[in-house]
Amino acid sequence: MKPIRISEISYTNVWPIHYYFETAGLSVELIPQVPSQLNQGMAKGEIDLGAISSFAYGAAYPNYVILPNLSVSVRGPVGSIFLFTKGQELHELEGAKIALTNTSWTSVNLLRVILERFEKITPNYITMSPNLEQMMEQADAALMIGDDAIRGSWHNPGYRVYDLGLEWFKRTGLSMTFAVWAVRKEILETRSPELERIYQRFIEAKEKSKRNLTPVIDKAIRKVGGDKEFWQHYFDGLIHDFGKSEIQGLQAYFQYVTELGILKKEIHICTLDSLAKLST
């Protein structure tokens, strides 16, 4: 039987779940890529389960089921999803050209909700590789996510920076979930015992990070830069659970993207409740 192929987002925001994830005794293959690549891989059946953009769940609905109590969420600033502008306030971006990173699905459409639904403006969008200097040469503003956004903020030559987690919270008062752990229904139906073991390992890994985040912080410093204080504050701001608050926020997000016509059908969040007992 083939190994179960597990997605691994190539950003630090998933490390509190993935750092301690033990594969010993499991028939699995980890596939580390940026979110947009993982989303496409799962849609094609090349990835079986794991972290994907929240938007990808809606785009493929109802083909996936969400694993409970695992996510990358925030209730306020996220610290790694940034819109950089040349000084403009959000309402001043009417008709402006905005460069969108090609690594994102959730944040790209969250930006559209904030600008088109809440600010009532219609910018022009282009998609580019995540290089802040090149993006700002060709556009009036640039959206970056993950470690690319963090590095961009560190080397910001003076652009105004908007944190999309904060902008969402200011307008809705809700949590925002950027990534969920999901499984294709085919795997759920055919390899349920293995799925339970894999899920248990993810929960154990998350709990280990809660007890000792130091190795995760040290790895972030080595791989990305920054110092202990920065990463402690960054990870403290992230929520890796997926409870009622996160579900409520994500359901609102799906409602807004559907109202804008980005998604064409009503999305319902379906979690695999049979696994919930394993995470308590």
Image: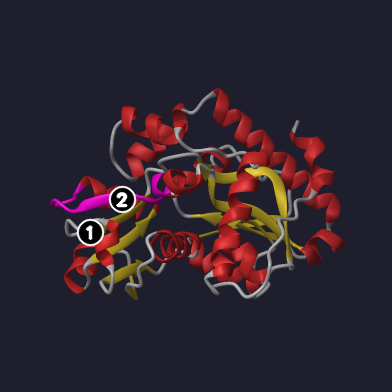
Secondary structure of the residue carrying tag 2 is strand
Residue 243 visible in the displayed image: no
Residue 206 horizontal/vertical position (percent): 61, 35
* Residue furthest to the front: 120
Residue 279 horizontal/vertical position (percent): 74, 35
Displayed quadrant of residue 226: top left
Taking the spot 27% from the left edge, 66% from the top edge, the residue there is 93
Number of residue marks: 2
Taking the spot 51% from the left edge, 45% from the top edge, the residue there is 14
Query: Which residue is denoted by mark 1 in the rendering?
Result: 85
Q: Quick check: 116 left or right of 141?
A: right
Residue 243 horizontal/vertical position (percent): 67, 40
Mark 2 and 1 residues: CB-CB less than 8 Å, in contact?
A: yes
Query: Which residue is denoted by mark 2 in the rendering?
Result: 162
Is 154 located above or below residue 186 in the figure? above
Q: Which of 15 and 153 is in front in this view?
A: 153
93 is within the stretch colored magenta: no
Query: What is the three-letter code of the residue carrying label 2?
Result: Tyr
Taking the spot 59% from the left edge, 65% from the top edge, the residue there is 56
Residue 152 horizontal/vertical position (percent): 25, 52
Magenta stretch, residue numbers: 155-167
Kindly report the distance in space between the C-alpha atoms of the residues bearing marks 2 and 1. 8 Å
Task: Name the quadrant of the N terminus.
Answer: bottom right
Task: Name the quadrant of the C terminus.
Answer: top right
